[in-house]
Amino acid sequence: MQLRENVPLSDLTTFHIGGPARYVATVTSVEELNESLDFARDQNLPWQILGGGSNVLVGDKGFDGLVIHLAIGGIEFDGSKVTVGAGESWDTLVAQSVEHKLWGLENLSGIPGSVGGAVVGGIGAYGASVGEHLTGVEAFNTQTRNAEKFTNAECRFGYRDSIFKHRPELVVLCATFALSAEPAPNVSYKDLASRFADSSLDLGTIRAAVLAIREGKFPDITREGTAGSYFKNPIVGESDANALREKYPELPLFAMPEVSGYKVPLAWLLDRVLGLKGASVGGARLFERQPLVIAASKGCSATDVHALATMVKKECKEKLFLDIEEEVVSW
């Protein structure tokens, strides 16, 4: 276990925001994870798990405790099955799956963060979601200090949700996916459908298209901070969907692979109804090409981001009668 003191958490998150952690322990095995938990117990410290830091906003004062930076790696292919450590980069997993000519994860190309974070957060994009091809997860119960196995159903995946979000004592160690060697292009989502006239496509072409679409919608994290989509899209039932269609005839609605109901594209409402695209507070702003995203310029504080998010939620509640949720986790 590598243990460091007074580590700036802005260096460990894609928002590039946040004060120091009192301690950061980088762990690469279950044994080191146990060691880090023992350290937190012996020092009477609160602790937090951090993966790729792509869905976290750390407060300006930092974290007065132990941050356990999960770096358990490894990607193992066995035919069309792949098992991957929670600390591996999600996009590395996707890229290697494409190289092995295995279908299933290509629409999730370019999503930053770790495999563990992807499982916990129930990621999804372009008509695909992490739970569609996942067959099992091994997690470490920090209360019992035992490993537990979860089937796909037991993970309880939903829209940007899983059981692991609701049971913080569980730390994802690895995940297994069942992919397919048979071509199965999924280009029905509008951003992909507009690029391809038919489904005679190879994996590399789809991955390249997804990466190009994401590049056009999200800030360059080498130049400014972001955690991707800051807000969840609201999910509504049939009657509410019909009411929205009547009020906003041009509003597109999307069926979801993870849950029943329709996804309301919040970005469309923020831009075309509320006119908030580009709105800013301090160094934080709603990104010009995708207002679901909050971009943070150099020197931006967590206080700026929170103030902007609060303003957006207030506008949605007062003018659209919509309660919106944040996707990003705040420390």
Image: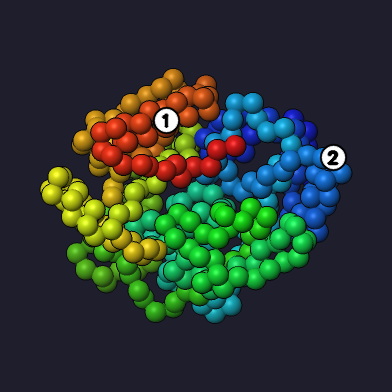
Q: Quadrant of the C terminus?
A: top right
- Residue farthest along the right direction in this orientation: 42
Judge whether 147 appears above or below 92 on screen: below
Where residue 310 appears, as percent x and y from the top left, is 42, 30
Q: Total of numbered circles in the picture?
A: 2
Name the residue at 50% across, 65% down: 156
Name the residue at 48% across, 29% down: 306
Residue 310's disc number: 1
Residue 16 seen in render = yes
Disc 1 vs disc 2: Cβ atoms closer than 8 Å? no
Q: Residues within 10 Å of mark 2 (few under 14, many from 20)?
A: few
Name the residue at 37% across, 24% down: 280
Judge whether 188 appears above or below 1 on screen: below
| 85 horizontally vs 122: left or right | right
- Can you identify the residue that label 2 sits on? 43
Where residue 25 appears, as percent x and y from the top left, is 75, 44
Q: How is the image coloured?
A: rainbow
